[in-house]
Structures are given as C-alpha cells and as structure tokens.
C-alpha cells in the first residue's frame, strides 16, 4: 500500500533550488540584491552567502546581475 502517492516532499535542497531560481529571475530583472531578497522573502545576507559557497549559483548570479544592470 502506497500512502501519499504523488506528494512532493519538500527538502532543504529543493527549497533552496526553488528560491535560488526566484532570486536569479529577480536579479535578471532588476540587478539589485536587496530588491531580489525582498521580492522572494529572504534575507539579503542569505543570498550573498549562497554566492560565496555555491560555485554554480555564483556563476549564474554574476550573469543575472550583469543582465539586470544592462551590462
């Protein structure tokens, strides 16, 4: 018997993956970390920490900020 079939389990990683994508989308639009943090309900420092410890996020972060700033 399978219980909760089709229910997606939310893990810390899946939450971060979803939030990080939202952050990157905001950065692409506005190029501002504080504004992106407010838009997705995170602390600005959390986003900066992600960029410091996650090389994949950091690479995407740089591109998103440049795009948002029109560089």
Image: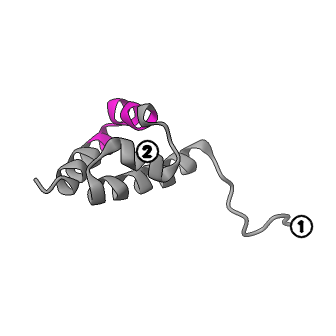
- In the image: residue 12, left or right of residue 20: right
- Residue drawn at (27%, 49%) of the image: 60
Residue 42: image location, x then y, percent? 50, 42
Establish if 3 lies above or below 20: below
Which segment is the magenta one?
Answer: 46-58
- Magenta span: helix, strand or loop, mainly? helix
Asked whether the residues under the numbered discs 2 and 1 touch, taking CB atoms below 8 Å apart as contact, a structural biologist would say: no
Would you identify the image quadrant in which residue 34 lies? Answer: top left
Disc 1 on helix, strand or loop?
loop
- Residue drawn at (65%, 52%) of the image: 10
Residue 8: image location, x then y, percent? 68, 61
| CA separation in Å, label 2 and label 1 | 42 Å
Residue 20: image location, x then y, percent? 43, 49
Q: Which of marks 2 and 1 is nearer the N terminus?
A: 1
Quadrant of the image for the N terminus?
A: bottom right
Establish if 28 lies above or below 45: below
- In the image: residue 33, left or right of residue 62: right
User: Is residue 38 within the magenta segment?
Assistant: no
Q: 32 or 66: nearer the eye?
A: 32
**Which residue is label 1 attached to?**
1
- Residue drawn at (23%, 48%) of the image: 65
**Which residue is label 2 attached to?**
37
């Amino acid at each position: 018997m399978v219980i909760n079939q089709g229910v997606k389990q939310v893990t810390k990683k899946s939450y971060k993956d979803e939030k990080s994508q939202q952050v990157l989308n905001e950065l692409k639009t506005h190029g501002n970390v504080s504004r992106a943090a407010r838009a997705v309900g995170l602390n600005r420092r959390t986003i900066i920490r992600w960029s410091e410890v996650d090389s994949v996020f950091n690479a995407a972060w740089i591109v998103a900020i440049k795009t948002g700033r029109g560089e």
